[in-house]
Image (cartoon, helix red, strand yellow):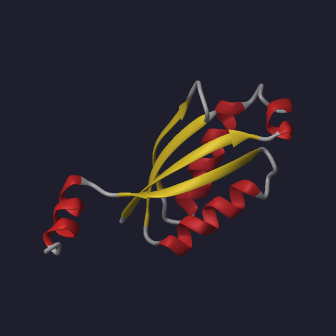
């Protein structure tokens, strides 16, 4: 499975519903599980992003589906990045000349 990092910002609607972020995170984990995604961490943060989420997903299509399902609720906007482990990076750079 591939690792992804999702950077999350609350929308105006999400701020209005800010009293229930832990339950929303739990619901996200369950939705991910139903899609074959394993959510590793959900961290509420200070700074440019309101949350940072790490998860493992079988493929880009599933990751996109999960992001769209989350965005459709209207509480957040996301930016998702593929993350590479040390082992994966060694394979990637092994092909450099």
The total number of labels drawn is 0
Q: Percent position (x, y) of residue 20?
A: 74, 30
The answer to which of 32 and 48 lies nearer the viewer is 48
| Quarter of the image where one finds residue 66 | bottom right
Question: In the figure, 82 relative to 9: above or below?
Answer: below
| Quarter of the image where one finds residue 46 | top right
| Quarter of the image where one finds residue 80 | bottom right
Q: Percent position (x, y) of residue 50?
A: 63, 33
The answer to which of 47 and 14 lies nearer the viewer is 47
The answer to which of 26 and 51 lies nearer the viewer is 51
Q: Where does the C terminus fall, quadrant-wise? A: bottom left
Question: In the figure, 11 relative to 93: above or below?
Answer: above
Residue at the (18%, 68%) spot, across then down: 91
Residue at the (69%, 32%) spot, across then down: 21
The answer to which of 1 and 81 lies nearer the viewer is 81
Q: Percent position (x, y) of residue 12?
A: 85, 37
Query: Is 74 left or right of 43, judged from the image as shown?
Result: right
Question: In the figure, 89 relative to 41: above or below?
Answer: below
Q: Percent position (x, y) of residue 94?
A: 13, 70
Query: Is 54 left or right of 44, judged from the image as shown?
Result: left
Query: Is 84 left or right of 11, judged from the image as shown?
Result: left
Q: Where does the N terminus fall, quadrant-wise? A: bottom left
Residue at the (61%, 41%) spot, across then down: 26
Residue at the (68%, 40%) spot, across then down: 9
């Amino acid at each position: 499975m591939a690792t992804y990092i999702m950077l999350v910002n609350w929308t105006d609607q999400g701020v209005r519903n800010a009293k229930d972020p832990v339950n929303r995170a739990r619901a996200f984990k369950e939705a991910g599980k139903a899609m074959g995604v394993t959510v590793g961490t959900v961290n509420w943060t200070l700074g440019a992003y309101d949350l940072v989420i790490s998860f493992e997903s079988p493929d880009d299509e599933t990751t996109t589906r999960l992001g769209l399902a989350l965005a459709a609720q209207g509480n957040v906007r996301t930016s998702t990045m593929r993350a590479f482990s040390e082992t994966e990076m060694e394979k990637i750079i092994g092909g450099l000349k």
